[in-house]
Amino acid sequence: EAGVTQFPSHSVIEKGQTVTLRCDPISGHDNLYWYRRVMGKEIKFLLHFVKESKQDESGMPNNRFLAERTGGTYSTLKVQPAELEDSGVYFCASSQERTSGRETQYFGPGTRLLVL
Amino acid sequence: GQNIDQPTEMTATEGAIVQINCTYQTSGFNGLFWYQQHAGEAPTFLSYNVLDGLEEKGRFSSFLSRSKGYSYLLLKELQMKDSASYLCAVRAPGSNYQLIWGAGTKLIIKP
């Protein structure tokens, strides 16, 4: 079974440009999460999809970030325009529908974004 | 506020045992996870505790005390491949199952 995949693995862009990150969750997983880790800091939650619906986007830093999950399969996270402080590693995770509370999130390898 | 603390870095010897501690202060509690992350790779699930006590899984064990807001990950018979970061994360109720993360403990294994 394929794991969570993310594209690209690395992205270097200039301030003001746009970048779109993609996440393909494990097939059949309804829950999809985006997290971000800024260098030297802990991983922070960004948002959570259940199928195509945004369940919780309380962690999105500002309106320069837009996440979509059309059709409830893969998800994209667009940053427009990118700022220097957006640099970091963006992780995607997915999980099956919760039936017991022992919901385990499976993570992708992350996209390393550097804004110059 | 939400706060999860774990040591920044630890060093241990191959074949030995190491305990990585995690303390948390969160508005509610609905389980604690430990993940392992090798440099440049995805965090991988190691263990989940929601009730007090010890959960053992091979060379790895995880302990939880909810009254103390404390957990530890115990690694036995250390191998060089265990060199990685170990992340403690708490799932708080009412937060829609998002995970609240510690900064991670970098474990260095020496021969």
Image: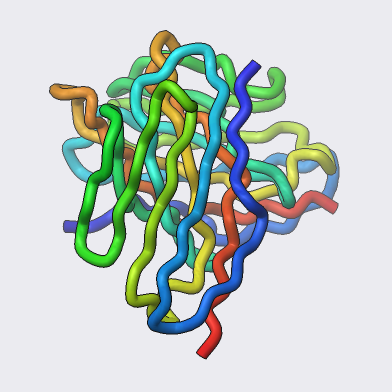
Residue A66 place in picture, x, y as percent = 58, 25
Examine the rendered structure and indicate whether residue A16 appears above or below residue A113. above
Nearest the eye: A2 or A40: A40
The outermost residue toward the bottom is B111
Q: Is residue A72 visible?
A: yes
Nearest the eye: A48 or B2: B2
Rendered residue at 55%/67% (across/down): B107
Rendered residue at 24%/46% (across/down): B55
Residue B100 place in picture, x, y as percent = 52, 30
Rendered residue at 35%/21% (across/down): B30
Total marks shown come to 0
Residue B31 place in picture, x, y as percent = 34, 28
Rendered residue at 23%/57% (across/down): A2
Give the position of the N terminus of chain A as an image quadrant.
Answer: bottom left
Examine the rendered structure and indicate whether residue B90 appears above or below residue A57. below
Color encoding of the figure = rainbow
Q: Is residue A48 visible?
A: no
Direction from residue A104 to residue A80 in the image, left or right: right
Examine the rendered structure and indicate whether residue B94 appears above or below residue B10. above
The outermost residue toward the top is B94
Residue B16 place in picture, x, y as percent = 42, 77
Direction from residue B110 to residue A26 in the image, left or right: left
Examine the rendered structure and indicate whether residue A35 appears above or below residue B12. above
In which quarter of the view is residue B105 placed? bottom right
